[in-house]
Image (spheres, helix red, strand yellow):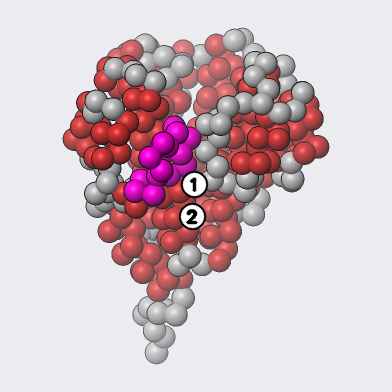
Amino acid sequence: MDAIFDFGGRESMYAYTHGMVSGLHGKLLRRQDYDLLIQAGSVQEVLSSLENTPYGGAIRKLRKDFTLQDVEEALASEFKRTYIEITSSIPGEDKAALDGLLLGGWDMRNLKTVVRALKAGFGGGSPGMFVVFGRLGRDELTGLAGLGDAGEIPGRVPEPYSTIMGNALRKGSQLEFEEDADRGFLLSILGEARGGVRDYIRLLVDILNLRTLMRCKAYGVDAGGHLINEGYHLKPRKLAELSRMDGDGFARALEGTPYHKAVSDTVSGARGCTLENLDARLQSVLTGEAEYQAILKPLGVASVIAYLRRREAEVAGLRAIVAGKWHKLGAEEIKAVLA
């Protein structure tokens, strides 16, 4: 008689990971915690409020004359520590795929920051310009920021970044560059990913395709050569339909997908929704989709991805609050940044 459960296989590994992630979910900051931090009178008060949270250990290691960069790196280091702890207990192929997605994603964000700085004439950058979490170290990134021309970057970074940046830097505008870089990155990690990680990357493809379609329509540009036909909800036939639609028709074509409401509100301008803040709304949808997949498949990588999305957003929120306090922004200004 065959065993009902394979206690030596993937489910066994993920049973342990699921228990760990469930416990970590309970330690995520709540709305009232954010409200308290936003109302804090100083950076030091924010840090004091975080001492009894998972960030406490990293915060207590800060030197007395800490800089903003020190605080940001402390927050990122705690996220990285948790990431390593969680992924050390999952199957090797899933860990490799997650490393490519998450660590590669941080590298791409830092590379795009370098390009923005160089194109704006801020070569050399600033000490707090990067949060180093991926495979590219601070010395490498600082060296890139000191280049005379962004066009030199492809020759200074490893693959797949060299090809991705080389192709993207041929684009005219900063927006076109960033979208092409995002597209190249997703294509580079999609081929090797399997199972739940691949499903999640395909959701990221959906988000990028929607952003691209709506911006192309806003500027009267054909989106044809700018889309990836590997989406999760938005298959090639749906993309072709969306490419033909405008305005309300575009939003109606998304009925039955999780993106319908966010796009419909943007098209109609409801609740202050604009093309500029559409991405934040789509990211919220993406978090909901990741959590739905985690409910469907709790003993799998989906539960890890759902938690990491929440945790990464938490770190981003804390960085924004600390930076706001550092630069003497008021509570309402910080809330606007977090919105």
User: Between 154 and 129, which is closer to the camera in this rendering?
Assistant: 129
Circle 1: residue type: Tyr
Residue at x-position 44% and y-position 55%: 81
| Corner quadrant of residue 212 | top right
User: Is the residue under label 1 in contact with that under label 2 (CB below 8 Å)?
Assistant: yes
Magenta range is: 58-76
Q: Position of residue 238 (x, y in %)?
A: 53, 31
Residue beneath disc 2: 196
Residue at x-position 68% and y-position 41%: 140
Q: Is residue 146 above or below residue 89?
A: above
Q: Is residue 19 above or below residue 328?
A: below
Asked if residue 71 lies in the magenta stretch, the reply is yes
Pointer 2 local density, CA inside 10 Å: few below 14, some 14–19, many at least 20: many
Asked if residue 232 lies in the magenta stretch, the reply is no
Q: Position of residue 213 (x, y in %)?
A: 56, 22
Q: Position of residue 4 (x, y in %)?
A: 36, 80
Q: CA distance from mark 2 to mark 1?
A: 6 Å
Residue at x-position 20% and y-position 32%: 36
